Amino acid sequence: MTELPEPEAGPGQVVVRIRAVCVHPADVAATTGEIPRGPVPPPFSPGWDIAGEVASVGPGTADFELGDRVVGMIPWYLTRGNPGGYAEFVAADVDWLVRLPDELDFVSAATVPLNAQTAHQGLALVSLAMLPAGSSILVTGASGGVGGFATQLAVQDGYRVVAQASHGDEQWVRGLGVHEVIARSVDLATVGPVGAVFDAVPVGEAAAAAVQDRGIVVATRPTPAIVPARGVRQELQLIRHDRDLLADLVGRVAAGQLRTRVAVTMPLTEAADAHRRVLAGGLHGKLVLTVG
C-alpha cells in the first residue's frame, strides 16, 4: 500500500470517493504481466469497476454534484492503471460514470460495469448472425461474471439457453431461467449442435465442437481458428465502454431485472490476498474490495 496525494478533478472530471471496487481476473493478469501495462512504469493501480460518491467536481463540470452516488468503469485498456480503481479516491472522467440508483448498494453495483457490458455487447454480435427465433445458444462459464449476465440477457432475448455451470453453482444458474444446465465436465461435442456459443470462459476448441456449421462463436479472449470449411463465424468480444448502455444495465440490476452475485468482500488493504483468492478459484460470485 502506498500513500499518494489526493487527486484533483480537472475539467470534465469528478473525484470519486471509492466505496467498492470489483476484483476481476484482468486485474490479476495486469499485475502478473499477462496484460501489457504499456509504457507507464510502476507504481500503477489495478481496478476497472468502481462505485462510490462524488467528493469534488472539476471546473465546468455539470453532470454530477457533491455527494452523488455513482458507479462506473475506468477504461483500464486506456489508462493502464493511471488511474485504476484500487484507491480511496479517483479522478474520473464523467463519461466513465453513471448515477447509482438508491435501490442498489455499492458492493453489488461494482460487479456490473465490465461484466454486464461485455455480455451485452457479445450478445449483440450473436444477433448479427440472424438466428431463427428460439435458436439454441450455449453459454460457457454461466456461473461467472460475464457468463452470468450473458445467460440472463440471452434468456430475455428469447434464446433457448444451455448453460455450463461450475460445480456448486448449478442451482444459481438454473434460477436464471435457462433451458438446461450442464456441468463443466461435460464433453461439449455431445451438447450441440447449437446455433451460437457465447464462450465466456473461454474454452476454445471445446466450445467450437458444440456449434453447428455456419453458426457463430463469440469469445472473450482469442481462441484457435475453427476449420474454415465449417463456415463458423468467430468473433472476439473486447469491452467497449458505453455510458448509455451502462446506465441501462445498472438500472436493470437495481430494478431486479438482472441478477449479480458477490461471493465475499475484503478491505482494500487486503488487495494482494484478494488476488490470491481469485487465482485459487472456487469463488461462487465476485470478490469486491471495500473502502471506508
Image (spheres, rainbow, N blue to C red):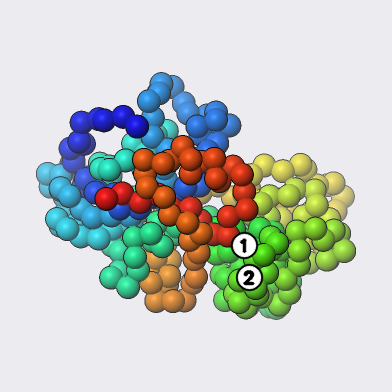
Image mark for residue 143: 1
* Quadrant of the drawing holding the N terminus: top left
Q: Quadrant of residue 187?
A: bottom right
Whether 83 is drawn above or below 106: the answer is above
Number of other residues with Cα within 10 Å of mark 2, as a class: few under 14, some 14 to 19, many 20 or more: many
Give the residue displayed 80% in from the left and 52% down from the top.
206
> In the structure shown, which secondary structural element does the residue marked by tag 1 occupy?
loop
Figure quadrant of residue 153: bottom right
Q: Residues within 10 Å of mark 1 (few under 14, many from 20)?
A: many
Q: Earlier in the sequence, mark 1 or mark 2?
A: 1
Q: Are marks 1 and 2 in contact (CB under 8 Å)?
A: yes
Q: Nearer the viewer, residue 165 or 241?
A: 165
Pick whichever, 7 or 21, lies toward us.
21
Q: Is residue 216 visible?
A: no
Residue type at the position of mark 2: Val
- Secondary structure at numbered mark 2: helix
Q: How many marks?
A: 2
Residue 39: numbered disc: none
Residue 35 appears at what percent x and percent y?
Answer: 54, 33
Res 185 quadrant in image: bottom right
Q: Which residue does the image show at 66% across and 51% down from the upper left? A: 201
Residue occupied by mark 2: 173
Q: Where 246 falls versus 8 (above or below)?
A: below
Q: x, y (%) of residue 289?
A: 40, 49
Q: Residue 287 or 252: which is nearer the viewer?
A: 287
Whether residue 241 is situated above or below residue 249 in the rendered picture: above
Q: Identify the residue at image location x=61%, y=67%.
A: 151
Residue 236 position, x and y percent, is: 63, 48
What's the CA distance linking mark 1 and mark 2? Answer: 6 Å
Looking at the rendered structure, the kind of residue marked 1 is Ser
Residue in the picture at 43% in, 66% down:
249
Question: Image check: 185 left or right of 265?
Answer: right
